Image (spheres, rainbow, N blue to C red):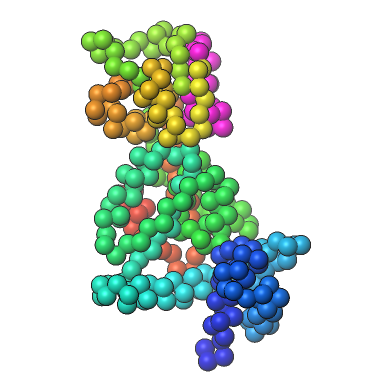
Amino acid sequence: MRNLNFRHLLYFWTVARAGHLTRAASELRVSQSALSAQIRHLESYLGRPLFERTGRTLQLTEFGAMVLDYADSIFGLGQELMASVRGGAGQRVQRLGVGAVATLSRNFTENLLRPLVSRAELRLSLQSGSLEELLERLRVHALDVVLSNKAVVAEVDRPWRCVPLARQSVCLIGPPRPGRRRFRLPDELNGQRCVLPGRSSDIRTQFDVWCEKAHVSIDAVAEVDDMAMLRLLARDSGAIAVLPEVVVQDELREGRLQRYCVIPGVFEHFYAITAFRHSPSPLVQQLLGARNR
């Protein structure tokens, strides 16, 4: 331990999290050449390469990913220490980085995280993006967990752990009907104006298959990838929306929208994706444990 240069380790940690030498050099306020030299010194001391260099791109080696895991623990604890000292709260700050794919219901994400966000010691970072973008941040340990409505398959260089969180029925939802009379499916759906999830959505694929089997033809007035926009269109367009209830839970509770019926056999699946870590995040374990009890 006396011989380990923690400045070199800090430089490595910053490069790995930034994913780019230029951005890391700017953050550390050193030249790229000096930063590269420090990384080489650390690699020489540890006896193995930390990065694979392809042009200007740096990819962590398997060994580098392991070293990053330890560096996360070392510098994460340092940040928590300083936050506790500055805050004077006398309790250990816990940090949780969560990524939520843009197509995921904001209500689902909020409901899932609600038991944790009330904790005074928690510092939550919530990021949105495509699944590919978020997985890359997860790979370099910039996130602790990614919430997705698509499953992922583990790969040799990306040993994802994909845990099912929930399965929710997909419904037909629209303006309140006179007398709240029962919606007759599939007959009443034929020819209706509908707003639908985008064609890349698993919900959309299932719904299209269901329509084909039920011999239903609809008028698709809008196709939306983003669930927040789909919620607005469900609320304001007057058309029938195809989505899980959780997306419009507030509008249903207030009576602004009505659930007409559940679409048989059509579901949205929710997953938590994590990467292998030497020391798994206790907060992620609590989050998944609470959800699966």
Instruction: Give, as a single range, the part of the protein colored magenta.
Output: 196-219
> Residue 170, relative to residue 103: is it above or below?
above
User: Residue reaching furthest bottom?
Assistant: 2
Indicate the position of residue 167 as horizontal and vertical percent values: 39, 37
Residue at 30% x, 22% y: name it: 257
Residue at 46% x, 9% y: name it: 190
Indicate the position of residue 102 as horizontal and vertical percent values: 49, 41
Residue at 51% x, 61% y: name it: 142
> Residue 174, relative to residue 14: is it above or below?
above
Q: Is residue 165 left or right of residue 131?
A: left
Q: Is residue 122 left or right of residue 14?
A: left
Nearest the viewer among 28 and 172 is 28
Indicate the position of residue 292 as horizontal and vertical percent values: 34, 48
Q: Is residue 63 visible?
A: no
How many numbered discs sit on the rendered protein? Answer: 0
Image-quadrant location for residue 94 = bottom left
206 within the magenta span: yes
Q: Is residue 137 visible?
A: yes
Image-quadrant location for residue 7 = bottom right
Indicate the position of residue 175 as horizontal and vertical percent values: 32, 18
> Residue 2, relative to residue 96: is it above or below?
below
Residue at 47% x, 8% y: name it: 191
291 within the magenta span: no
